[in-house]
């Protein structure tokens, strides 16, 4: 049902632009992230098969012939921005996730947009972390990895109910051992119909020294189009120079990363090799990451020295706009 979903995403874009969503402390589980096989922000192996688009490097891919024009419309002089960190208004900000065992009890979930949502039940723990915290009025994403079934469950605008069930705007389930896409035209817990977690900057990867997948970012104005692996648009703008959902950009090979802190260089190398994917309407050049108390915000803030002009668009083929 395209029109309600589109309306929802356009409203969401306005919320993001005025600062709602991840710019508040995350809530739920113990604020000290776990580092084992389960718990809040636990370390994870590679998500999806090696052949999945998220895990494919694009450092040698051709540049799109309209790259300069597209980047110019997003904003060549606009600063890059890490939309995650350890402390904002007293707590970590970004998008948290939780890893649960295969024995985690599943609970019922109802949806506003059930025609494009995967039905429940979902293995949501009672204290599941909600993006922005329990009282957030933003995106309220809830991300859960079932390490037993190796599945990813994601909810948008998620609210717990007194009876233990949940209600959400939309929800999607991804088999992490498969490259299967959502049906054409379907949203997910994200505007582009993509999974969220594979595109986040995660602390465990940065600490280990390697991010081997594409990252997720937002722009304020997208095109009424998408490109695989995205499956959904969230705009009425038909300007062909606006970014379609799923568009991939990369940090230019000539960009000198040597002056940045070592952990920030991990992120910059990933942006060169794997790039980042337009996944939602939001602030321009905002990079998504996990809300985690272990981040060093002073280090992350050096990313703000980057500008839109430091990026280029990877050649696009197979754009869907009808």
Image: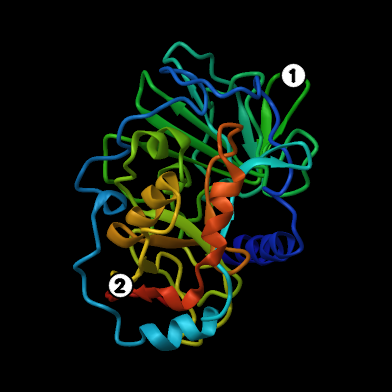
Which residue is most to the front? 259
> Taking 276 as reference, is 126 above or below it?
above
Disc 1 from disc 2: Cα separation: 55 Å
- Rendered residue at 58%/34% (across/down): 292
Cβ–Cβ under 8 Å for marks 1 and 2: no
- Rendered residue at 54%/57% (across/down): 302
Select label 1 or label 2 by which is in front.
2
Percent position of residue 34, x then y: 51, 20
Under circle 2, the secondary element is loop
| Res 179 quadrant in image | top left
Crowd class of label 1 (few under 14; some 14 to 19; many from 20; radius 10 Å):
few
Residue 322 in sight: no
> Taking 125 as reference, is 65 above or below it?
below
- Rendered residue at 40%/60% (across/down): 276
In the rendered view, does 270 fall on the left or right side of 62?
Answer: right
Percent position of residue 248, x then y: 37, 66
Residue 163: mark:
1
Q: Which sits in the foreground, 217 or 80?
A: 80
> Taking 56 as reference, is 40 above or below it?
above
Q: Which sits in the foreground, 3 or 90?
A: 90
Considering the image in quadrants, where does the C terminus appear?
A: bottom left
Residue highlighted by disc 2 = 254
Q: Earlier in the sequence, mark 1 or mark 2?
A: 1
Percent position of residue 288, x then y: 53, 52
Considering the image in quadrants, where does the N terminus appear?
A: bottom right
Q: Which sits in the foreground, 201 or 221?
A: 201
Q: Which sits in the foreground, 225 or 99?
A: 99
Under circle 1, the secondary element is loop
In the rendered view, does 123 fall on the left or right side of 168?
Answer: left
């Amino acid at each position: 049902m395209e029109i309600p979903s589109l309306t929802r995403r356009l409203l969401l874009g306005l919320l993001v632009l005025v600062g709602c969503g991840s710019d508040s402390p995350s809530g739920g589980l113990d604020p000290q992230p776990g580092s084992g096989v389960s718990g809040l922000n636990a370390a994870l192996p590679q998500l999806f098969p090696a052949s999945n688009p998220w895990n494919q490097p694009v450092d040698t891919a051709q540049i799109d012939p309209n790259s300069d024009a597209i980047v110019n419309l997003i904003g060549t002089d606009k600063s890059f921005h890490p939309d995650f960190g350890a402390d904002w208004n007293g707590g970590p900000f970004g998008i948290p996730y939780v890893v649960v065992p295969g024995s985690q009890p599943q609970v019922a979930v109802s949806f506003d947009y059930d025609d494009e949502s995967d039905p429940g039940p979902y293995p949501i723990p009672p204290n599941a972390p909600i993006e922005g915290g329990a009282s957030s009025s933003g995106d309220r994403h809830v991300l859960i990895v079932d390490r037993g079934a190796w599945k990813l469950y994601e909810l948008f605008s998620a609210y717990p109910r007194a009876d233990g069930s949940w209600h959400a705007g939309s929800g999607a389930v991804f088999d992490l051992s498969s490259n299967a896409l959502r049906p054409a035209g379907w949203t997910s817990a994200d505007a582009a119909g993509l999974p969220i977690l594979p595109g986040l900057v995660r602390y465990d990867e940065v600490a280990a020294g390697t991010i081997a997948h594409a990252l997720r970012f937002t722009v304020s104005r997208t095109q009424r189009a998408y490109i695989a692996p995205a499956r959904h648009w969230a705009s009425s703008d038909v300007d062909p120079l606006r970014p379609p959902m799923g568009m991939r950009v990369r940090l230019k090979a000539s960009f000198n990363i040597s002056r940045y802190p070592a952990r920030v260089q991990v992120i910059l190398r990933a942006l060169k090799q794997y790039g980042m994917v337009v996944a939602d309407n939001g602030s321009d050049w905002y990079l998504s990451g996990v809300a985690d108390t272990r981040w060093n915000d002073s280090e992350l803030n050096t990313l703000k020295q980057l500008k839109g002009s430091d990026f280029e668009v990877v050649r696009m083929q197979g754009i869907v706009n009808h």
